[in-house]
Image (spheres, helix red, strand yellow):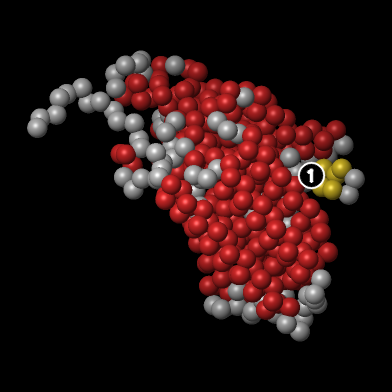
Amino acid sequence: MRTVTEVNNQRIVELTLLLLAAFITLATVAIAAVAESTDIGWAAIPYLAVLLFLWAISHLSLRKWAPTANGLLFPITALLQGLGVAFIFRVNSDLLLNHLSWSAFATFGFISVIVGVRDLKRLQNFQKPLGLAGLALTLIPVITKISDGKIGSHRSFQIGSVAIDPSHLGTLCLIIFFAGWLANYRLRNTAEYLGEAERLDGDPSRFVPLIGAWLVASITVIFQSDVSSAFILVAIFLSMWWVAVGRPLDLVLFLAAIAGSVLIALSNVPELQERFDAWADPWSNLQFGEVINRSTFALAGGGLTGTGPGEGSANWVVGATDQFAFVPIAEELGFIGGAAVLSTFLLLIGVGLRLATAARREFESLSAIGITIFFASQAWAPIAVVLRLLPPNDLSLPFVSSNGGALFSCTIALALLLKISETAPLASNPTEVLPQIASGTESTP
């Protein structure tokens, strides 16, 4: 059990880091405001006040309903969100009202999860409905495009003037579904290791989750023309599956099936071919390659220390507040600022994986792994496009971009990770919290 001092320390650490995140956000906006090329005025104050108010509500909610939750997770994501808002001010302030509306909606969802999910075991009981919901949310854009006679990469659909991308939330639902499903395999794997169950290799049911993940990833590649989204799904599933099952032969077969789907899509989907052509030679494709070329020049202009907030050419890069949100940060804050953002994501991932190893139950551990890899892959994919490590995609940088749907899904995922951290005791030695496996022999004194 955690002592009162340990609990209080978590919230004190959280509040201190939140104040630091607020200071960095305000300082970035203030420095950008004095630049000659920006028109940030006193109108920025109400927007920043709303953002800080939402952070305060979230912190007070954690203090009341999740006092033992990890104290690092929320300040890390708040810092990323604050930097995103600062550069939205800089690049396109017209997006701020919509972004803060989504932030308020995400805060409401965050508090709902913190208050409503009192026991994660109950969440496991809804794994099948969540799996069906995740599959439906993932396929909605595909069905919509096919019904319109189109096959393309645009995963969002319009409701009035609001663009909704349900695939992020669908991925989160699939994470919970696979965590509940694979938890049984992990328990059986442990029993097999102890000689208490038959070998899993002889059970063909182990291929069912592999086939399901392959189908979802193949649909994403073929009908969405988006290898990066498929990469995220595969990265999440394989991380969870390897921890739960860990069969090298099955892994080889799964990767071969995924490679086959990509090759089929490359041969039959023109847009996917164009994306790969732009990846290989950005100068040959104006639609997808121009933004990559501009991003390259912007990053080169930033150098080591950057041009300074408000002094860059972010308006020159299409999608600088969404898919290419990393570009203005790396240009105006330089290599040092870009590395700091990457280090922030790495810290978030490290905390998440540590919580996964400390979780008491298999479902919580696998859920923490899935959510952490969701953050990691979702962050790496758009940055990899800028660095020409992946083909062009429509993915948004978590917490930083102006994509409201992505912000909402990531905030819900953060709330679930915080709930998992409540069940992971503070201990420097993993043997204090992990279940002990009896060796079957008596230890000698």
Vertical placement of residue 10 versus 303, above or below: above
Q: Is residue 336 visible?
A: yes
Name the residue that disc number 1 marks.
164
Picture quadrant of residue 243: top left
Vertical placement of residue 322 versus 411, above or below: below
Q: Residue at x 56, y 71 (%)?
A: 337
Side of 240 relative to 437 (left or right): right
Query: Amino acid under label 1?
Result: Ile
Q: Quadrant of the N terminus?
A: top left
Q: Secondary structure at mark 1?
A: strand
Q: Residue at x 17, y 24 (%)?
A: 441
Q: Is residue 256 visible?
A: no
Q: Residue at x 51, y 23 (%)?
A: 207
Picture quadrant of residue 203: top left
Q: Measured from the top left, where is residue 391 in percent x and y?
A: 64, 53
**Residue that sits furthest to the front in the current view:** 4
Between residue 50 and residue 396, name the one nearer to us.
50
Q: Measured from the top left, where is residue 361 in percent x and y?
A: 44, 30
Q: Quadrant of the C terminus?
A: top left
Between residue 438 and residue 280, name the one nearer to us.
438
